[in-house]
Amino acid sequence: MFVRRIIICFCLVAAAQIHAQSTVSKEDKAQLKKIYDTALLEGNSYQWLDHLSNQIGARLSGSLNAQKAVEWGKAELEKLRLDKVWLQPVMVPKWTRGVTEFAYIETEPGKSTNVPICALGGSVPTPIGGLKAPLIEIKSLEALEKLGRKAIEGKIVFYNRPMQADLINTFEAYGGCVDQRYAGAAAAAKYGAVGVLVRSLTLRSDDLPHTGAMSYGDLKDSEKIPAAAISTNGADLLSSMLKLNPNIKFHINMNCRTWEDVESFNVIGEIKGSEFPDKYMVVGGHLDSWDLGDGSHDDGAGIVQSMEVLRLFKKIGYQPKHSIRVVMFMNEENGLRGGKKYAKIATQKNEDHVFALESDSGGFTPRGFSFDCTDATFNKVLSWKPLFEPYLIHYFVKGGSGADIGPLKKDTNVLAGLRPDSQRYFDYHHAKNDTFDAVNKRELELGAATMTSLVYLFDKYGIE
Amino acid sequence: MFVRRIIICFCLVAAAQIHAQSTVSKEDKAQLKKIYDTALLEGNSYQWLDHLSNQIGARLSGSLNAQKAVEWGKAELEKLRLDKVWLQPVMVPKWTRGVTEFAYIETEPGKSTNVPICALGGSVPTPIGGLKAPLIEIKSLEALEKLGRKAIEGKIVFYNRPMQADLINTFEAYGGCVDQRYAGAAAAAKYGAVGVLVRSLTLRSDDLPHTGAMSYGDLKDSEKIPAAAISTNGADLLSSMLKLNPNIKFHINMNCRTWEDVESFNVIGEIKGSEFPDKYMVVGGHLDSWDLGDGSHDDGAGIVQSMEVLRLFKKIGYQPKHSIRVVMFMNEENGLRGGKKYAKIATQKNEDHVFALESDSGGFTPRGFSFDCTDATFNKVLSWKPLFEPYLIHYFVKGGSGADIGPLKKDTNVLAGLRPDSQRYFDYHHAKNDTFDAVNKRELELGAATMTSLVYLFDKYGIE
């Protein structure tokens, strides 16, 4: 009985394998080869990124550079002779860093050590002349309650829980720490803290502070306290000094500011589908970036790879059955307004979005994709694995796609995220070294080809 | 009948899968986790590489730095409290670059354009005052015969076949071009060429010449001609200028020199096996490097990863059954004398080397291994694949291991090579940017853990 069940089970497995084999047609093999060859030999993603990073640069939502990037994106898509290119207006937050921040540790009056900091995105400024207060170092938001108001009041809360180095996927390590940056100020303010300092979210030991979004939650304006990131080396130094003398003070100077919302745009281009023009497939990334580097990995890479998907289809002469859109989302970093607006308009217009793919994990060697979809669809994807093997794409997992396309989620559609090698991503993430030279041409191009291949397969075989 | 055969076939596949499952024990899972955790949380490979690259630096065979590296390697192994550490003498070639080379394109007397070049390792110098001659550009060694002596005599042969960008594995692209560098001078000299200039073996467009080994084959000393590499940008410029004017001349100045062989050493450390002390397993890389960068990827990474294998065994308290040796081979780059000597002594002493693993493909994110072994052993390795999955190690192929361990090959043993992501390797290979800052700590550590895991499994389960 047991043996017989095993045999039956094997036959099912085997049947699944036959099915898998059968879907790997010679035509698909050839088409993927054409896509990869074209991306590597006649690609344009790297040249686009060169312009976006080096001629435009950092493009924080609401900035002049963000507007330049919108205009550039539209002009480049128009050159591709797509069926339609347009701008979709969206109101976005405008926050400016102001004069470069500075901070120092004061062991006694007149005796100080400078440390590298930067304001977190959305932070209020320090008072003119700066903020000076003693510190309390903690490892989690939960520690606030244990310590209680008395221990925290009047102090700068120093969140110093490092990213976990033994996690292979660095995004997991990030996910395990980002609450300190995002929600640390709101939580500490409730206990009377006068500011927060957060250990930079990177696995490197270096001198670069990493910015990123934070939220004050339901705090009133008068309750908001300044929030800054400190470099990992700075955090380690500060922690050592606090052990020697818990009474040292910390001085922070920041004059960042939040302004009225301003109008910006999602940039959209479309190739009309030959069989299902009313069914939409989206590829995208976000056009905005933080303001410290030039946003080459986050998310210039995703933008140019998404543009390249449509360019490669044109170049290899593939006419998609579904309408394929590239969307350059605005304001992923500090608001997600672009992603929300795009989904809202899609709902209003009753546009059926059957598939969306985002690239927002850096321009590193692609390893595979994550999928937010049904088991049936995921099994279909797994049947395509052999097609990707020659390109060393091996990582197909369920769970997670991308922030910008998230609002498009329905029970019936498929969202996916490109998953590049994650080891170096947080070396650059939201820091001033996220620049063009940190992107390798071939790795970027392989990512674009991998995305194009997945879109090709979903377009050809449909959803479910 | 057909269906029945298919079912039988499936049952065999399924049986293999069951077997595969059964070998993935909880104990092995836990052991691999311990290895990876320790490498990432308490690793020492990056700190070792920092010293080797930044405190010692480039270490061409026969140089003072190579000797410093030997002494450092021995001292560091001794600190690990292995059962035995020793130096194995080996005579190595000594070649020096001399004064920095220079070259220019001369369109007419007094009108010239500088281009970046470097001598190939082993080249003879130019005459004092330099070599100036017209050029002939070709794409292959075979083109020499077609052109014939008349077209080549008195000229500098300019080999300009670029690496193929559409190959996913960049080592394949390298393999398809390296004949120009290695054998180009010997071939051209036979047709009366006075020098050769070789397009640098990299997929990047940049200004760095990449050196590397070359051979004059059976040429007499008097027949040898100078051989240099030119940067890819320089090669493209030169090619364009030749199209405009085939009569332009090229000037090269090099005063490199080959000296008498000198004594150097392989550095060896050993943990004695508890069950099979007379069966040896080797992990290694090469301690020598080229002289332009500091050899961090080639092959400082392989050296420190190999050291780390033994250190991790000690650290996690694993006592191997077989005798495990780390071998820092000398002179891989321009002679392979260390690898040959090690194998010769092993044969003389009748030491049974059952397994050897080399890391000499850079310190990038590990993807898997290549194996030179029987099908039976390879199938056993494939049964371990699930163990490596959590670490995103997915690439297990037959064919190729490493140059230094090659001479150890027998019918019955297993040779293997670590296969890191190859996209960026040739950006740095043999050029002055192969430096410590190009190595990522986590990627290096993951490679060391991956090697340690494979050695652990072979040690535990044996060969065959």
Image: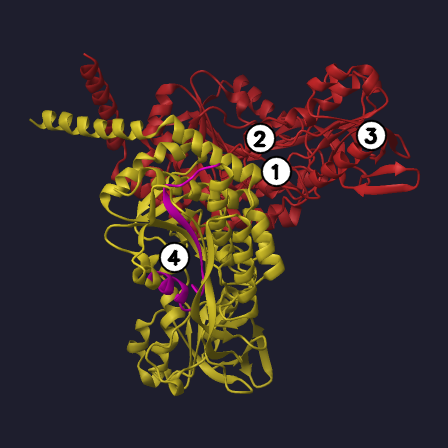
Chain colours: A yellow, B red
The magenta stretch is: A317-343
Q: Which mark is residue B173?
A: 2
Give the residue pinned by disc 4.
A173
**Mark 1: which amino acid?**
Leu
Give the residue pinned by disc 1.
B203
Q: Which mark is residue B445?
A: none
Mark in the foreground, 4 or 2: 2
Q: Chain of mark 4?
A: A
| Cα separation between marks 2 and 3 | 29 Å
| Cα separation between marks 1 and 2 | 9 Å
Q: Are the two marked residues, 4 and 2, in contact with CB atoms closer than 8 angstroms?
A: no
Same chain for marks 1 and 3?
yes
Residue B356 is situated, as x and y percent measured from the top left of the image, at: 47, 28
Q: Is residue A407 visible?
A: yes
Q: Is residue A234 above or below residue B118?
A: below
| Cα separation between marks 4 and 3 | 58 Å
Residue B119 is situated, as x and y percent measured from the top left of the image, at: 76, 34
Give the residue pinned by disc 3.
B246
Earlier along the polypeptide chain: callout 1 or callout 2? 2
Residue B319 occupies which quadrant of the picture? top left
Q: Residues within 10 Å of mark 3 (few under 14, many from 20)?
A: some
**Mark 2: which amino acid?**
Ala
Q: Are the two marked residues, 2 and 3, in contact with CB atoms closer than 8 angstroms?
A: no
**Mark 3: which amino acid?**
Pro
Mark in the foreground, 2 or 3: 3
